Amino acid sequence: MKKALLVVDYTVDFVAEDGLLTCGLPGQKLEQAITTLTKDFLAQGDAVFFINDLHEEGDTFHPEHKLFPPHNIRGTAGRNMYGALHDIYQANPAIIWLDKTRYSAFAGTNLFMLLRERDIETLHIVGVCTDICILHTCIDAYNLGYTTFVHEAGVASFNEQAHDFALAHIKNSLGFTII
Ligand code: ZN
């Protein structure tokens, strides 16, 4: 069964100390685990997706407009991958970059079609935040019937309680494997 690694929102704005909507140290601590997973998947010829939030400057119609300060604005360095992942992306044309505009990696993207084309039925998910974009992506993966693994060393949130809740929900209510 073919598998893919989904790295969700591991961008400068969401992770770096000076990111515009950063989850801070918990996110920065994931760098090694996400780097290792990315290299392993690439080495094995498995698909790797970097799926990142995209906003337009001054977009007052977006539902996040009322919820969060501006972040991940098109054309800004805040949209670059954080840390070592930036160079890895530059050096590996096999990595598939997708822009998303909602929490779930499936919402409004062609992720589902790209997975179908590649006969991928198993997902490995990492990134931030556990209780927002990871959770929403997992719920869509559940509804679409994917066998899914969430790597505990590869997900984090600014809110530890919400992180714990999300992992418990993903395990107990979606039936996914936390590894
Ligand atoms: Zn956003």
Image: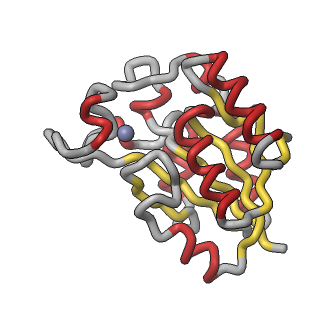
Residue with the most extreme bottom position: 117
Residue at point 62%, 20% (across, down): 26
Residue 42, x across and y down, in percent = 70, 61
**Quadrant of the image occupied by residue 85:** top right
Question: How far across and how far down the image is residue 146, in percent?
Answer: 74, 64
Relative to 152, say whether 137 is above or below.
Answer: below
Q: Which of 97 and 35 is in front in this view?
A: 97
Q: Where is residue 10 drawn, in percent x and y?
A: 52, 39
Question: Which quarter of the rendered image does ligand 1 occupy?
Answer: top left
Horizontal side of 159 relative to 64 (left or right) equals: right
Residue 63 to residue 121: above or below? above
Q: Quadrant of the N terminus?
A: bottom right
Left or right position of 91 against 4: left
Occupied quadrant, residue 73: top left
Percent position (x, y) of residue 36? Answer: 74, 44
* Residue at the image position 14 percent from the left and 39 percent from the top: 58
Q: How many numbered dots are placed on residues in this image? A: 0
As drawn, is 130 to the left or to the right of 133?
right
